[in-house]
Amino acid sequence: MRILLEEKVILARLDELAAAITAHYRGRPLTALALLNGALFFAGDLLRRIPLPLLIDTVAVSSYRHEASSGKLTLRSAPKLPVAGREILLLDEILDTGLTLRGVRDYLLEQGAAEVRSCVLLDKACRRAPGGLAHADWCGFEIPDVYVVGYGLDADEQHRNHPFVGVLD
């Protein structure tokens, strides 16, 4: 495995993202919603850096079968907190086709969310699918079209716990 982003680089970027998100939401109620399982590490590290009162929830979604996106979004568990009237910050580890974030965003708006913004650790802009979310409101790193693992990203549920982002050989 080749390391693409070292832990110290990721954590420094999280400080920058947290500062930008804090400035945007200062004085406003915020609900952070992490997409499971992938965003678990990213969300935990990012949200500890945001010194605002906020609610934290999760939603389990999937559009992947083995190593490729199926294009079909499956909601495995809905948010536990009510989203109606809330400003939601969606957190995901990677934006590639954009179909997952678009699907979850549309679902939250249908449930009455006042606003839905997104923050992703990684962006593979070259992989956007028609109908997918074009971009995240906040992004940690743009990466090339390589298969990455670590820091929440997996290959058949393995490698999520690495503190770095690596490229599988």
Image (cartoon, rainbow, N blue to C red):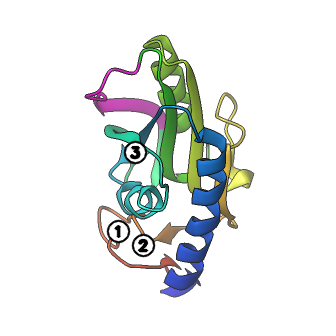
Mark 2 — residue?
A: 150
Q: Give the secondary structure at mark 3.
A: strand
> Magenta residues?
71-83
Mark 2 and mark 3 lie on one chain; the one further toward the N terminus is 3
Is residue 59 placed above or below 143 in the rendered structure? above
The percent coordinates of residue 146 (x first, y second) are: 61, 68
Q: How crowded is mark 1: few (under 14 residues within 10 Å), some or many (20 or more)?
A: many
Image position of 71 (left or right of 62): right
- Give x and y (percent) for residue 131: 66, 28
Residue 122 seen in render: no
Labels 2 & 1 near each other (Cβ < 8 A) = yes
Pointer 3 residue: 34
Res 56 quadrant in image: top left
Q: Which of marks 2 and 3 is in front?
A: 3
Under mark 2, the amino acid is Gly
At label 2, counting other C-alpha atoms closer than 10 Å, the crowd grade (few under 14, some 14-19, many 20 or more) is: many
The residue tagged 1 is 160
Q: Earlier in the sequence, mark 1 or mark 3?
A: 3
Give amino acid for label 1: Arg
Residue drawn at (44%, 61%), measured in percent from left and top?
42
Q: Quadrant of residue 152?
A: bottom left
Tell me which residue sits at (68%, 66%) in the image. 143
SS of the residue under disc 1:
loop
- Give residue 102's position: percent from left, percent from top: 57, 30
Q: What residue is drawn where x is 47% and y is 55%?
A: 51
